[in-house]
Image (cartoon, rainbow, N blue to C red):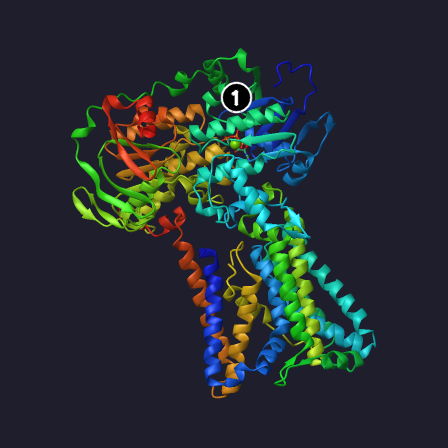
């Protein structure tokens, strides 16, 4: 067992354990109904989390996620619901805008050496502001295409529903895993997060990779916004405030190191499903308010980061910095 | 092999190359010519501008003047990647690989074999294993790079750099952590590349190696080219004089430390009995007395660094006991070790030591300040004093003590870390490869300082791959092989051939 798989294994063990607990309380967790709903309800932010996984592996962060989802929703609602644009054309336009938006953030991060935190925080305000400028009311979308999509379900024998959103989530998961592990772009992202100075000297196209990573994240975030738009059939500039924090939490709980270089798309998926399971459990249980999910996220996040710290400090080579920092003594 | 350089056309030509950093002229109007099949060695003191020349040729930095011609055509390398595409393959100074990726992935990063549009992981692992075997290294290539020692990482970096499709191979101090055995391997690879007409630029501070492999030598001093020679034209003394701009003995200023009286009569500082850790090192006994220098000799992977880590508490012993000044102690963490008065200057200074953003002064006083406690603040005047003293003693090339360490040349960074431990004033100092990457002048100076510290009564344990150096300063030499202490040599027994024999004996 490689120590680099331990965080991933922990994520998996926690998921299975929680799921079994949930199952022992509510046997419906054994049905495709709950499974289908879990996939459907968590699809939108799960897709964004897969994008965030790449960003964090590259050693960066993307705070613009929640705002970009809101902007996408409002844009779609306005164009399709009010202006009567064709939905597919609208999606193509917003995906392009989003991708360019991400690429621009990546451009500033790389070429102007501005910390990702600052650039994407600006992105957060910009996108949220744009959403409000487009519209402050909630706009309904009443379009036959939206109806068709919501009718696009596979129904399991136990009446469990496998929706379009769920399918999209799984598709992006597979594409994400493929990108991360089987393409040069993916490996370059890991190299960048592992040691960006060395990556440059090894001939990794650092600038291009940085721009692509943020473009990918924003592309997937817009896609998340579209999935949400399809399921809510409306757009609202006030939604998804602070969602980026849940997304980051899921990525970290999924075993990705915030310092970059190490992480797994599948881990993020499992973490999203874990948080979804807890949410569903709390809803079914009813005795606790669903807000307990926040407390659980806090505890899980802390335990996972603590675990990672423990693992890395057990490593044979200990940094001299640490040695020094722990050595105050009178001379 | 190119013996008639003038008739063949140059492979790489550099004319009037200059580079100015804020506060430093790193390179000024340097000419440099590399012929196909030639090994052209660059020498010069730490900070002379060798790495800067390489970085200009490979697009890490951008030149402020001059031209670079590859096969007669001017090139403007934009990035290391661009240089690679032009056919210039480079192994930079200090290991520059990705610690969080596997060994195999590091070797193939950016040029992975593909199959059906996917990276072919199996091929990567197989080929990496094969390439490393060719270098006599049989390791698990799927493990993270960070799980291997610096020396092995250096070999991995070389294996990555030796790209047969390249026209020019540049090696910036590739042998700094290697022992003779591996250096031999590298040289035989270099010779076979010569046969193929690849031009090789090699930077090294080991003059023996220069005379073994070079066809041509260029000497840099203070950013200027001060000489270019065919190997046959030159003696070692001439070369050193040209590098330093004065003779080595003059450079040492007659600061020679005379041999100490018998150190063995003093009290033991540290004694360990039956110390061991499963899978790391077999049980060993070791006594280190005050005022004594104990050298650890052995090949790569023989357990030298492991002993240092065990004694300093970075790794914990699972057998045996330790005594400091006769009292039993538990060396369970570096913190404890430091409390008992130990200091360790680690082997991998890049990872374990340098804090690039901090200034030279801050890096130097770090360990001392930590020992004194952060509330017992070292006065600024004292800090400046210590820093200036060390900058002078070790010839650290820097405009002033406030320059961030990351802007120093590689060798000068090494000196800063060494200075940190020299001023930290421990009772027992462990130095792991203290002279790695350090030029001849400063090398001699460091050995003087080591001897002086022992004379002041410090106990010292020094790991080095350079036998001549170990022989020079050790009162006792511990010989290791295959993670096992073989024995100790003392007094007259200490010379290079006895150590070699002891290492090789069966
Ligand atoms: N990024 C940088 N910023 C500022 N100054 C720099 C930078 N890189 C190098 N220098 C300065 O340029 C000079 C030459 O450095 P260089 O690294 O070329 O030396 P070197 O000959 O390779 O020495 P060494 O043997 O120590 O590796 C040094 O004085 C160094 O301080
Ligand atoms: Mg150098």
Residue B296 in picture, x, y percent from top left? 31, 33
Mark 1 vs ligand 1: CB below 8 Å: no
Instruction: Report the front residue among B323 and B282.
Output: B282
Disc 1: which residue? B213
Point out the image quarter for the C terminus of chain B. Answer: top left
Q: Is residue A17 above or below residue B163?
A: below
Specify whether A195 is left or right of B266.
Answer: right
- Does dot 1 land on a helix, a strand or a loop? helix
- The residue drawn where x is 69% and y is 17% is B8
Q: Is residue A239 above or below residue B52?
A: below
Instruction: Report the front residue among B143 and A213.
Output: B143
Q: Using the image, name the chain to which the residue with label 1 belongs.
A: B
Point out the image quarter for the N terminus of chain B. Answer: top right
Total residue callouts:
1
The quadrant in which residue B492 appears is top left
Residue B84 in picture, x, y percent from top left? 65, 37
- The residue drawn where x is 56% and y is 64% is A266
Whether residue B339 is visible here, answered yes or no, is: yes
Instruction: Report the front residue among B109 and A319.
Output: B109
Whether residue B221 is visible here, answered yes or no, is: no
Residue that lies at the very extreme toward the bottom in this rendered image? A287
Instruction: Report the front residue among B135 and A292.
Output: B135
Residue B417 in picture, x, y percent from top left? 41, 38
The quadrant in which residue B501 appears is top left
Residue that lies at the very extreme toward the top in this rendered image? B233
Residue A67 in picture, x, y percent from top left? 65, 69
User: Badge 1 local density, few (<14 within 10 Å), some, or many (20+)?
Assistant: some
């Amino acid at each position: 067992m490689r120590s680099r798989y331990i965080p991933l294994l922990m994520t998996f063990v926690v998921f299975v354990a929680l799921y079994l607990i949930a199952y022992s309380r509510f046997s419906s967790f054994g049905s495709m109904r709950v499974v289908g709903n879990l996939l459907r309800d968590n699809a939108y932010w799960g897709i964004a989390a897969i994008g965030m996984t790449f960003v964090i592996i590259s050693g960066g962060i993307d705070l613009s996620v929640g705002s970009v989802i809101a902007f996408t929703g409002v844009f779609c609602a306005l164009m399709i619901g009010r202006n009567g644009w064709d939905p597919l054309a609208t999606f193509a336009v917003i995906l392009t805008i989003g991708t360019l938006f991400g690429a621009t953030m990546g451009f500033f991060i790389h070429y102007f050496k501005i910390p990702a935190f600052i650039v994407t925080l600006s992105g957060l305000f910009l996108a949220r502001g744009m959403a409000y400028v487009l519209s402050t009311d909630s706009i309904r979308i009443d379009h036959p295409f939206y109806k068709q999509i919501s009718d696009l379900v596979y129904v399991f024998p136990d009446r469990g529903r496998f929706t379009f959103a769920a399918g999209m989530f799984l598709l992006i998961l597979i594409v994400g895993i493929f990108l991360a592990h089987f393409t040069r772009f993916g490996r370059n992202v890991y190299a960048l997060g592992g040691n960006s100075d060395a990556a440059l000297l090894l001939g990794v196209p650092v600038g291009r990779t940085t721009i692509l990573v943020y473009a990918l994240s924003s592309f997937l975030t817009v896609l998340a916004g579209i999935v949400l738009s399809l399921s809510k059939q409306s757009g609202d500039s006030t939604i998804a405030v602070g969602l980026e924090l849940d997304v980051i939490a899921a990525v970290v709980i999924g075993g990705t190191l915030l310092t970059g270089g190490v992480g797994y798309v599948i881990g993020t998926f499992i973490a999203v499903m874990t948080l979804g399971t807890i949410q569903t459990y709390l809803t079914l249980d009813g005795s606790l308010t669903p807000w307990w999910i926040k407390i659980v996220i806090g505890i899980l996040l802390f335990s996972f980061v603590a675990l990672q710290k423990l693992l890395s400090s057990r490593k044979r080579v200990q940094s001299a910095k640490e040695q020094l920092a722990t050595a105050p003594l009178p001379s | 092999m190119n013996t008639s350089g003038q008739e063949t056309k140059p492979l790489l030509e550099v004319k009037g190359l200059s580079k100015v950093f804020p506060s430093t002229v790193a390179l000024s109007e340097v000419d440099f010519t590399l012929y196909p099949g030639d090994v052209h060695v660059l020498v010069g003191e730490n900070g002379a501008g060798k790495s800067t020349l390489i970085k200009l040729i490979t697009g890490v930095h951008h030149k402020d003047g001059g031209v670079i011609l590859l096969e007669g055509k001017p090139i403007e390398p934009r990035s290391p990647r661009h240089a690679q595409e032009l056919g210039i393959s480079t192994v930079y100074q200090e290991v520059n690989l990705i610690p969080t990726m596997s060994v195999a992935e590091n070797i193939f990063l950016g040029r992975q074999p593909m199959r059906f549009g996917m990276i072919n992981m199996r091929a990567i692992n197989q080929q990496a294993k094969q390439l490393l075997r060719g270098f006599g290294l049989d390791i698990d290539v799927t493990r993270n790079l960070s799980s291997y020692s610096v020396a092995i990482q250096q070999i991995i970096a070389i294996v990555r750099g030796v790209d047969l499709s390249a026209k020019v191979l540049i090696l910036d101090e590739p042998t700094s952590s290697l022992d003779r055995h591996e250096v031999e391997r590298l040289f035989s690879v270099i010779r076979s590349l010569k046969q193929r007409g690849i031009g090789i630029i090699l930077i090294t501070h080991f003059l023996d190696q220069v005379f073994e492999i070079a066809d041509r030598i260029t000497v840099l001093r203070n950013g200027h080219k001060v000489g270019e020679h065919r190997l046959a034209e030159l003696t070692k003394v001439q070369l050193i004089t040209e590098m330093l701009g004065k003779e080595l003995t003059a450079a040492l200023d007659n600061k020679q430390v005379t041999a100490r009286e018998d150190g063995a009569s003093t009290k033991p500082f540290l004694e360990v009995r039956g110390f061991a850790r499963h899978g790391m090192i077999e049980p060993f006994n070791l006594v280190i007395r005050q005022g004594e220098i104990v050298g650890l000799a052995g090949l790569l992977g023989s357990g030298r660094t492991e002993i240092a880590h065990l004694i300093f508490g970075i790794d914990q012993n699972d057998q045996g006991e330790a005594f400091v000044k006769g009292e039993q102690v538990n060396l369970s963490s570096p913190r404890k070790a430091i409390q008992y008065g130990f200091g360790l200057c680690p082997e991998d200074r890049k990872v374990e030591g340098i804090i690039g953003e901090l200034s030279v002064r801050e890096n130097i006083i770090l360990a001392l300040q930590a020992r004194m406690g952060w509330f017992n603040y070292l006065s600024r005047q004292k800090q400046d004093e210590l820093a200036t003293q060390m900058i002078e003693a070790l010839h650290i090339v820097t405009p002033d003590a406030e320059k961030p360490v990351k802007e120093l040349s590689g060798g000068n960074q090494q000196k800063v870390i060494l200075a940190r431990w020299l001023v930290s004033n421990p009772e027992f100092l462990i130095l792991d490869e203290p002279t790695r990457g350090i030029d001849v002048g400063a090398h001699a100076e460091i050995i003087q300082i080591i001897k002086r510290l022992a004379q002041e009564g410090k106990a010292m344990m020094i790991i080095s791959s350079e036998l001549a150096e170990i022989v020079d300063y050790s009162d006792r030499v511990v010989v290791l092989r295959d993670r096992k202490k073989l024995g100790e040599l003392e007094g007259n027994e200490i010379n290079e051939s006895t150590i070699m024999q002891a290492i090789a004996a069966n």
